[in-house]
């Protein structure tokens, strides 16, 4: 089966910043993404968990995008404009997709 090169971008950010990030992605012409809740983890400040939190304020989400390599720089510029001032991390990995026309 034929596969095509793509980029998988995962942006982990505070849940309260989710709409600002997705607005920025739409402005950057990113047509698809998935949003997942992050239940807990550990970082520079040590371990954390959503357990016992009443609101979204202390939680994190991951926004996952798969894009054609030509769209990567525009996506990263948009994401960084949001992430640079808040808690967040952006990772980029190479991936393969089966239906390139969807990305």
Image: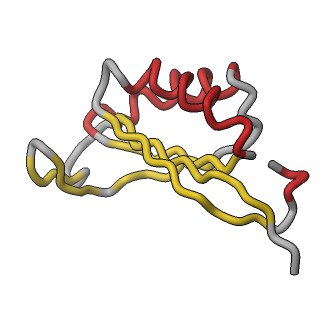
Residue located 42% across and 41% down the image: 90
> Is 103 left, or right, of 60 in this rendering?
right
**How many labels, in total?**
0
Q: Position of residue 53 (x, y in %)?
A: 23, 44
> In the image as oriented, which residue stretches furthest toward the left?
46
Q: Quadrant of the N terminus?
A: bottom right
Residue located 12% across and 54% down the image: 47
Q: Against 31, is 102 above or below?
A: below
Q: Position of residue 16 (x, y in %)?
A: 39, 28
Residue located 50% across and 52% down the image: 36
Residue located 76% across and 64% down the image: 97
Q: Against 103, is 20 above or below?
A: above
Comparing 79 with 39, the one in front is: 79
- Can the viewer see residue 29? yes
Q: Position of residue 46 (x, y in %)?
A: 9, 50
Comparing 20 with 96, the one in front is: 96
Instruction: Name the colouring of the figure.
Output: secondary structure
Q: Against 9, is 40 above or below?
A: below
> In the image as oriented, which residue stretches furthest toward the right?
101
> Is 44 left, or right, of 64 in this rendering?
left
> Is 98 left, or right, of 55 in this rendering?
right
- Can the viewer see residue 19? no
Q: Position of residue 45 (x, y in %)?
A: 10, 42
Q: Against 86, is 46 above or below?
A: below
Say which quarter of the image contains residue 60: top left
């Amino acid at each position: 089966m034929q596969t095509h090169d793509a980029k998988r971008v995962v942006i982990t950010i505070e849940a309260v910043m989710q709409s600002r990030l997705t607005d920025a992605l739409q402005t950057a012409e990113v047509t698809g993404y998935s949003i997942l809740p992050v239940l807990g983890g550990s970082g520079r400040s040590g371990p954390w968990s959503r357990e016992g939190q009443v609101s979204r304020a202390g939680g994190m989400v991951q926004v996952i995008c798969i894009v054609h390599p030509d769209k990567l720089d525009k996506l990263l510029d948009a994401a960084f404009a949001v992430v640079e001032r808040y808690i967040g991390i952006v990772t980029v990995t190479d991936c393969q997709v089966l239906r390139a026309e969807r990305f």
